[in-house]
Image (cartoon, helix red, strand yellow):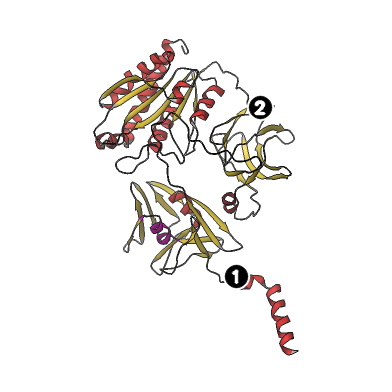
Amino acid sequence: MKKWSAAVVFVLFLCLFPMMAHADRVPSIMLDGIAIDQKAGAPAENIGKTVMVPIRIVSENLGYDVKWEKATQTVHVQKGSSFIEMTAGKDAATVNGNVVNLDAPPLIKQGTTLVPLRFVGEGMGLQVGWDNGTKTVSLFSIPPVVETESDRDPVDTPAPVGSSELQSISFSGDRLIVATSGSISPKVSSISGPERIIVDLPNTTFSQTFVQGQASSPDGSGQMNIPDSALVSKVRFAMFSSSPSTVRIVLDLSQNATANWSLGENNVLLVDVTAGNGTTNSEPALPEKSGKAVVVIDPGHGGRQSGAVSVTGAYEKDFNLAVGLKVKALLEQNPNIQTVITRQDDTELSLQQRVDIAKLNQADLFVSIHGNKFTTPVPNGIETLYTREASKSLAETLHKHVLPVTGLKDRGVKVASLHVTRETTMPAVLLELGFLSNPADEALMLSEAYQNQCAQAIVDGIVEYLSVTNRIS
């Protein structure tokens, strides 16, 4: 009887105080589904409201070199041209020369630097998840895919109806970007009182990776505050219906606005928000022409599609974006030109989606920015590619302006059957601004001075072309 009573008391104790059994549990770390051995050095731990993970253990499992500078209490983490520096006690780190604020300062324990979990994702390009119930850190590395010289988009096997999963949501530059694993049929509408734009994704659920990233919401629901938009104040998302399974995304508006959307072949939904009368259709709508010449700038590649990898390990997608953003900034200074850029960050878009963006915005011309590559380091120089006869004049004008400022070999203006120059309906060219596989070209291309020169030359060429064709006065 006494043994039975003792057992009952023990069971009641566990039921009444379940958290005590987990209070001292050391968080485990899963990298791409495999547990990382934390025996060497200090393990991950909860400090206040911040999950701290050992940077050395994570980075070395990803092939990074880690060096400890005792005098300054600084850790240097490097892989190829990517590098991270952080100092114990300081609430900011440096990632590839850019300062990144940390949720909490790094700590040194048993010779290991512990850093906030969120920083691991930002600094090392990982998808990060935290399961508070099991105290598990989930890290997912997505290696870049080098695209081949192919006219075709990578095609994934379509997911069966009802099995599409939402993988990521982001909002930048008044553009909502939603990536899913399978085909989707979005329904976009607007509601007043207060003003909102509703994006419903029928037959869609949240992926497990996405749910793990919502640490405080085990069902995947959450929200993002948008401080840098004059149109959208907040983005909220949740499962709206279970039959059929429907994900609903709500954009809380600061003023009346409309939404124009496009859907690419790689299951990425773009919803562009513009100031308007608040009437949004469930079908893609064409924006009204402002009277300005519409120029689409297309930084090639992005996301998993790295493009060429340079001789020092830099990615073409980053070079393309750097030049594209500089072109955009310069064009926006011209009151006669309306500038549209296909991506403003490391977003992955299909070739067809880039074409769709140009058509959706009724562009007057389309310029795709790239770096070249070859299997040997010998080839170098500048070349400009076009497909349709209507694009020849634009190609020649841009080439005339870009070539002299680079000082590189003239590889000429050439005809090539490329998706973005063939399937567009406006004059369209693709610029190859040097070979990342050539050491001399690469050294120039990775310098900001060269990127600025190329950007200015591209803008000069665009302005001359538009003036000659009477698209601007």
Give the prevailing secondary structure in the magenta stretch: helix
Question: Horizontal placement of 185 versus 459: left or right?
Answer: right
Amino acid type, callout 2: Glu
On residue 283, the disc is 2
Q: Secondary structure at mark 2?
A: loop
Amino acid type, callout 1: His
On residue 22, the disc is 1
Question: Horizontal placement of 132 versus 121: left or right?
Answer: right
Is residue 139 placed above or below 187 in the rendered structure? below
At horizontal 55% and vertical 39% (from top left) the residue drawn is 157
On residue 76, the disc is none
At horizontal 28% and vertical 23% (from top left) the residue drawn is 411
Number of disc labels: 2
Q: Which residues are magenta?
A: 54-64
Was residue 182 drawn as part of the magenta stretch in this picture? no
Q: Position of residue 25 (x, y in %)?
A: 55, 70
At horizontal 52% and vertical 24% (from top left) the residue drawn is 358
